[in-house]
Image (spheres, rainbow, N blue to C red):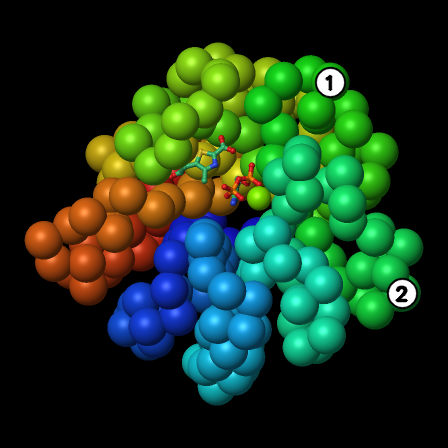
């Protein structure tokens, strides 16, 4: 699995950053009308195809199916309504969020493409009912998931990446550190270099 996993909130951000060498990118749109979400998904799908990047559609699994996208990310609440049989029939792969043991059991039973654990560090992005999981928890999760790729998310920065990978994560996901950076392009390059040079 790709080590660097970028999450963006708008397709224009994806179009700015993917050409820098991002190979795994999630379109995580919140609070937009459905037709606007669909427009952005189509744009992101076509752009990622040209740049040979893997697009992951967050939350909107029905739109992903309708627009022939091949990868979605679902949280535990998203999983309540998702039609996994339909996703499987269409060959749409899915990654799943987990925060505790019960959620991990539920996720693994669905044979996801990856399992995400978060928040590893405190996150500014959204209010969460879980405190920071910490690096020992990353190691424990990797032991539990075995060969299923583990994505670490929450409060990550380039400085924290080597420790998170050493703890057992296969991939590191980021929103704020790049979204809020004074120079998002330079910060994306730094993430790419850091992920390429980090030793597991
Ligand atoms: C890689 C990755 N991990 C976790 C999440 C969070 O998903 P979810 O809990 O459904 O929360 P929202 O992102 O939908 O607010 C994610 N999107 N990606
Ligand atoms: C969207 C999201 N999901 C999380 C989880 O734990 O499931 S943590 C998180 C926020 C990640 O963003 P940042 O890099 O800004 O902290
Ligand atoms: Mg979600």
Q: Position of residue 29 (x, y in %)?
A: 46, 57
Q: Which element type, helix, strand or loop, lies under badge 2?
A: helix
Using residue 157 as the reference point, say whether residue 113 is left or right of it: right
Q: Position of residue 144 (x, y in %)?
A: 70, 22
Please tell me which residue lies in front, 119 or 65: 65
The disc, 2 or 1, on the residue closer to the chain's N-terminal end is 2
Q: Residue at x 31, y 56 (%)?
A: 192
Q: Residue at x 48, y 34 (%)?
A: 152
Q: Position of residue 111 (x, y in %)?
A: 81, 42
Using residue 128 as the reference point, say whether residue 89 is left or right of it: right
What label does residue 46 carry, if any?
none
How crowded pointer 2 is (Cα within 10 Å; few <14, some 14-19, many 20+) is rated as: few
- The quadrant in which the C terminus is found is top left
Instruction: Check if mark 2's residue and mark 1's residue have beta carbons within 8 Å.
Output: no
Image position of 150 with respect to 87: above or below: above
Q: Residue at x 73, y 18 (%)?
A: 102
Q: Can residue 25 be seen at all in this image of the molecule?
A: no
Please tell me which residue lies in front, 50 or 126: 126
Q: CA distance from mark 2 to mark 1?
A: 26 Å
Image position of 67 with respect to 13: above or below: below
Residue placed under numbered mark 1 in the picture: 102
């Amino acid at each position: 699995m790709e080590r660097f996993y970028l999450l963006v909130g708008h397709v224009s951000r994806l179009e700015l950053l993917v050409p820098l060498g991002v190979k795994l990118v999630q379109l995580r749109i919140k609070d937009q009308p459905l037709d606007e979400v669909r427009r952005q998904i189509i744009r992101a799908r076509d752009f990622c195809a040209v740049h040979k990047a893997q697009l992951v559609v967050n939350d909107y699994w029905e739109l992903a199916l309708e627009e022939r996208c091949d990868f979605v990310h679902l949280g535990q609440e998203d999983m309540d309504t998702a039609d996994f049989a339909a996703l499987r029939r269409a060959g749409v792969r899915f990654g799943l969020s987990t925060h505790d043991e019960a959620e991990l059991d539920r996720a693994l039973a669905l044979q996801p493409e990856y399992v995400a654990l978060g928040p590893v560090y405190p996150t500014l992005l959204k209010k969460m009912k879980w405190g920071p999981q910490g690096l020992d928890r990353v190691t424990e999760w990797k032991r539990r998931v075995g060969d299923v790729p583990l994505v670490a998310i929450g409060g990550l920065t380039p400085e924290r990446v080597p420790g998170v990978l050493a703890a057992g994560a296969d991939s590191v996901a980021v929103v704020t550190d790049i979204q809020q950076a004074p120079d998002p392009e330079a910060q994306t390059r730094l993430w790419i270099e850091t992920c390429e040079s980090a030793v597991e």
